[in-house]
Each structure stands twice: as C-alpha cells, then as structure tokens.
Amino acid sequence: MATISVPLSHNTSSRQHLSTTRHRFHFPRSSHSPLTIACSARRNSSESKESFSHLKELKGVACGFLAAWAVTAASPVIAANQRLPPLSTEPDRCERAFVGNTIGQANGVYDKPIDLRFCDYTNEKSNLKGKSLAAALMSDAKFDGADMSEVVMSKAYAVGASFKGVDFSNAVLDRVNFGKAHLEGAVFKNTVLSGSTFNEAQLQDAVFEDTIIGYIDLQKLCTNTTLSPDGRAELGCR
C-alpha cells in the first residue's frame, strides 16, 4: 500500500497537548497496491480557534490537490484493467455488421453494442462499405479482402483481428485499437487514423496515401518495424 501523509501544524509541542484531525482518501492504484492519501491537522492547546480554523482551511486545499492528483494517476491503470464483456449469444450477431449502428458516429455512441468477435467477413465486397461500426468489438474477426471504404470504426476494439488487403479508403478509423492485428496490404487512402494504436500489428505493404494522422500518433506508428519502405515514405517517417 502506498501512503502519502500531509501533517499540518504550527509547532512541535509535546504530544499530550495536541489534538489531531485526520482524513484518509483511498484510491485503487493497482490490484495489489492501493493508494492512500492521509491528511492531518494538529492543534496545540494554546492556539486560538481562529488560528486552528485557518489551518484546517489550508489542510483542505492541500489535501484536495493531492486527491485530484491521485485520481488522475490511478485512472489509466483502472482503464487498462477493464475486461471485455462476454461474447454475445445472439444468433445473428455477425450479420449486425451489415446494418451497423443507427446512431453511432465519430464519438463511438451506439444504440446497441456490435459484437463481431470471431466473425468471418472474408472477401465481403458490398455489405460493409460505408457502415457505422463505432465501438464495435472486432478482436479475432476476419475481414481479409473486404471492402470497408467509408466505414466509421471510431473507438473499435480490433486486437488480433485480420484485415489483410482490406480497402479502408476514406474511412474514419480514429481511436481504434489495432494491437497485434494483421493489416498486410491494407489500403489507408485518405483515411482518418488519429488516436489509433498499432502495437505489434503487421503492416507489411500497407498503403498510407494521404492518411490523416496526428504528429504524436505518427511517431508511434513509425516505430513499427513491419512497415514497408513505401509505407514509411508515404507516412513521412524519418
């Protein structure tokens, strides 16, 4: 357990003349190491109530700053430990990709979750084009050779999915997790890739002509060693 203690006092008189007010705030730092913020204010018996009241106000401000910091520091860990929902048992869940979300667009809002995990759309040339698949669960699904031009996949989870030779021209693929995905020969022409991640993805012969991507995201993408020389040149990797 990690603990941060903030004692506030005017002097260091003997303990018998001190009264202590202490507040603790607990924040989940990890599954094994919770973070505790402990704030205390001590009053000497000779101090006036007005002086101690002012001290308590200072304590509240200091502890508030620490609590805000703790929440900020803990949040990424909590998000990283989130689990995916159980696989949908709907018999037609794979066909839902042909309909898409009726209200979801770039913010990843949807009327009903789209669970496409383990579905096979190999060489699908007509039913995926232009669909809104915002926040779709796509891990381990197969889209090899499919036409996914103009599709909206904002905030989709595509870890381990296969998109070999997929046409993503004019698509909106912002904030997509492509970790360990197979994207060999995929075409990202005039495609929005801002905020998307490609950790350990396979990008051999992928085309990035006129791709729209932020500078920081570009620097991360350029570290992928599977990019072909042409792909690196199109992205402007140095």
Image (spheres, rainbow, N blue to C red):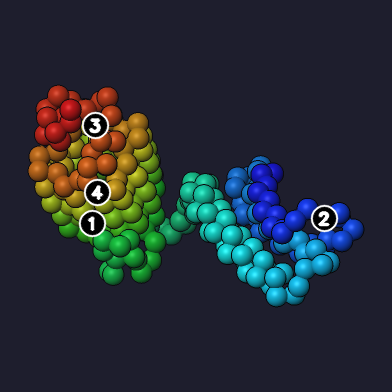
Residue 198 or 194: which is nearer the viewer? 194
In the displayed orientation, state which residue is furthest to the right: 16
- Pointer 3 residue: 222
Identify which amino acid the numbered label 3 is placed on: Cys
Tell me: 133 left or right of 86: left
Quadrant of res 16? bottom right
Number of marks in the image? Answer: 4
Q: Position of residue 145 (x, y in %)?
A: 19, 39
Q: CA distance from mark 4 to mark 3?
A: 14 Å
Identify which amino acid the numbered label 4 is placed on: Ser
* Label 4: how many Cα within 10 Å (few below 14, some 14–19, many 20+): many
Mark 1: secondary structure: loop
Identify which amino acid the numbered label 2 is placed on: Ser
- Pointer 2 residue: 13
157 relative to 222, above or below: below
Q: Earlier in the sequence, mark 4 or mark 3?
A: 4
85 relative to 222, above or below: below
Identify the image quadrant of the C terminus: top left
- Pointer 4 residue: 194
Seen at 37% across and 41% down, the residue is 159
| Number of the front mark, 3 or 1 | 3
Q: CA distance from mark 2 to mark 1?
A: 66 Å
* Label 2: how many Cα within 10 Å (few below 14, some 14–19, many 20+): few
Seen at 11% across and 47% down, the residue is 190
Mark 2: secondary structure: loop
Tell me: 133 left or right of 80: left
